[in-house]
Image (cartoon, rainbow, N blue to C red):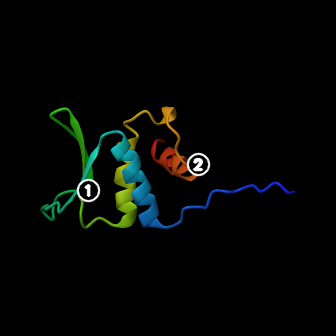
């Protein structure tokens, strides 16, 4: 009898990363909304951000944001929470660590 070691499949798909980050955020009670953010052309490009409204966290992300921008906004929002006390897949934790620097 041999010993089988199961390795975690690497996450490479942006949509899979976004799904997992969204799931993590929802675990902290964050409501996620994808809405069009209308801005003046002269304004700094706003992709989204985390808000505290009436005691509830809401993460608003521009519905036209790219996959990379969605990942960035989700990761930046998650750094406001205590991630050390919960299990996070190593690949995801590594990604989040890059944004917390």
Q: In which quarter of the image is the N terminus?
A: bottom right
Which residue was labeled with disc 2? Answer: 90
What percent of the width, then of the height, locates residue 67? Answer: 38, 65
Helix, strand or loop under label 2: helix
Q: Which of 81 and 22 is in front in this view?
A: 22
Instruction: Name above or below for residue 45 compared with residue 55.
Output: below
Q: Which of 13 and 5 is in front in this view?
A: 5
Instruction: Name above or below for residue 37 compared with residue 86.
Output: below
Mark carried by residue 79: none
Instruction: Name above or below for residue 24 compared with residue 64.
Output: above
Name the residue rendered at 40%, 59% in the picture: 18
Which residue is situated farthest in the right direction here? 1
Helix, strand or loop under label 1: strand
Q: Nearer the viewer, residue 11 or 3?
A: 3
Which residue was labeled with disc 1? Answer: 61
Q: Nearer the viewer, residue 51 or 55?
A: 55
Ranked by sequence position, the earlier of labels 2 and 1 is 1
- The CA span between labels 2 and 1 is 25 Å
Residue 69 horizontal side relative to residue 41, left or right: right
């Amino acid at each position: 009898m041999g010993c089988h070691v199961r390795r975690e499949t690497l996450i490479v798909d942006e949509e899979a990363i976004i799904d997992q980050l969204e799931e993590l955020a929802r675990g902290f009670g964050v409501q996620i909304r994808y809405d069009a953010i209308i801005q003046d052309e002269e304004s700094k490009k706003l992709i989204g951000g985390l808000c505290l409204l009436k005691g509830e966290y809401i993460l608003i992300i521009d519905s036209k944001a790219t996959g990379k921008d969605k990942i960035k906004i989700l990761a930046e929002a998650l750094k406001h929470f205590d991630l050390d006390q919960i299990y996070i897949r190593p690949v995801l934790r590594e990604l989040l660590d890059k944004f917390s620097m």
